[in-house]
Amino acid sequence: MIDLKNKILSMVSEDFAEIEHALKQNLNPYLDLISEVASHILFSGGKRLRPLLMILSARICGYKGNMDKTYSTIFEYLHAATLLHDDLVDGATLRRGKPVAHSIWGNSITVLTGDFLLGRSLSISAKTGLLKVIQIITKITEDMSQGEIHQLTRIGNLDLTEDEYMEIIRRKTAVLIQGACWTGALIADASEKEEKGLAEYGFDLGIAFQMADDLLDYTSDTSILGKEVGTDLKEGKLTLPVIYSLKKADYEDRIIMEKIITDKNFSFNDFEILIELLKKYGGLEYTKKLASKHIEKAKNSILFFEPSATKELLLNIADYALVRKA
């Protein structure tokens, strides 16, 4: 895993530096306070996966312009906006190992800064001059909001189905990653086949990425993850490892699981018991296998591209999404 991560980083170090520069250059808020709050989330150690994927998707399609870094900021601004809003809605305390924005600046300033970042992403998408890009960005914004609302309406519900879970992560995560890849193809004036392949790659990568994220809540630790483990459970969010295990558990074990899941103040020992039950009933393994299938689908979607360093990068990123620790 470490070798794969280092390999990817060595190949994109220049891109990352240019993304960081573009994020600062294109923020352009009117008030210094907005910049301060936005910078707190934007420059706190994010992976920059979404802007990087947009850039690589444009590159593999032969993009020759000089606006790809600017356009890539659309997806990091959108992502940061959702994190600001989600942390407040969820009552989170940590994000990337730092206190959440609303604990420092309050709810109102944080919400409005998130709104600014959403607006900024739309302004930059308009600069592409491509109606389809604007339509993609607005649809992403609608989907992410609806995904969050759907999840909120099902908080604490032990009867959440796998189909509902898939619909929630489609809207909350997959469409943004798909949109980044799709937009890269569009700004490169790609063929219909290239556009479709990259959109499918982004979608399946996004699904697998979220599943891997949900696994980390039960397999990582706070110092690596940058937030408390077990956070999803304490917020009443049932993810696939739990949904699957609840369905498979016998009566006695299900009662134990339900007791822990519904207790927002469960102890460390309770959490350890739950993890053992997730292992016993295959929830962790099932989630990993399903995520692996989506990674394979993602990789297969771009196999038709000619061999290149960019294609290798996209394939490596797909593999890394599954084995990462944070």
Image: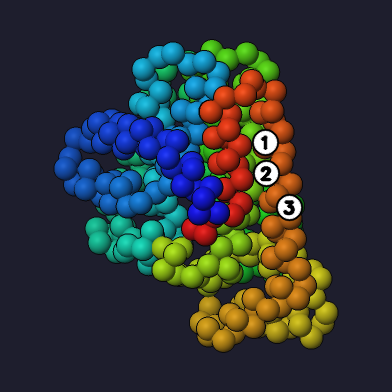
Along the line of sight, which residue is nearer the eye, 121 or 49?
49
Query: In the image, what residue occupies the spot 21% across and 48% down?
Result: 36
Q: Looking at the rendering, which quadrant does residue 318 occupy?
A: top right
Left/right placement of residue 85 relative to residue 40 reads right
Locate residue 162, reporting x and y percent. Answer: 74, 57
Locate residue 121, reporting x and y percent. Answer: 39, 32
Locate residue 87, reporting x and y percent. Answer: 41, 58
Along the line of sight, which residue is nearer the eye, 262 or 25?
25
Residue 165 in view of the camera: yes
Q: Earlier in the sequence, mark 3 or mark 1?
A: 3
Residue type marked 2: Ile
Q: Are marks 3 and 1 in contact (CB under 8 Å)?
A: no
Residue 197 in the image: above or below residue 273:
above
Residue type marked 1: Lys
Residue 215 in the image: above or below residue 290:
below
**Residue at which label 1 appears:** 299
**Residue at which label 2 appears:** 295
Q: Are marks 2 and 1 in contact (CB under 8 Å)?
A: yes
**Residue at which label 3 appears:** 290
Query: In the image, what residue occupies the spot 56% across and 63% down?
Result: 216
Distance, label 2 to label 1, CA atoms, is: 6 Å
Secondary structure at numbered mark 1: helix
Query: In the image, what residue occupies the spot 48% across and 38% down?
Result: 50
Residue 57 in the image: above or below residue 244:
above
Residue 159 in view of the camera: no
Residue type marked 3: Leu
Q: Looking at the rendering, which quadrant does residue 115 occupy?
A: top left
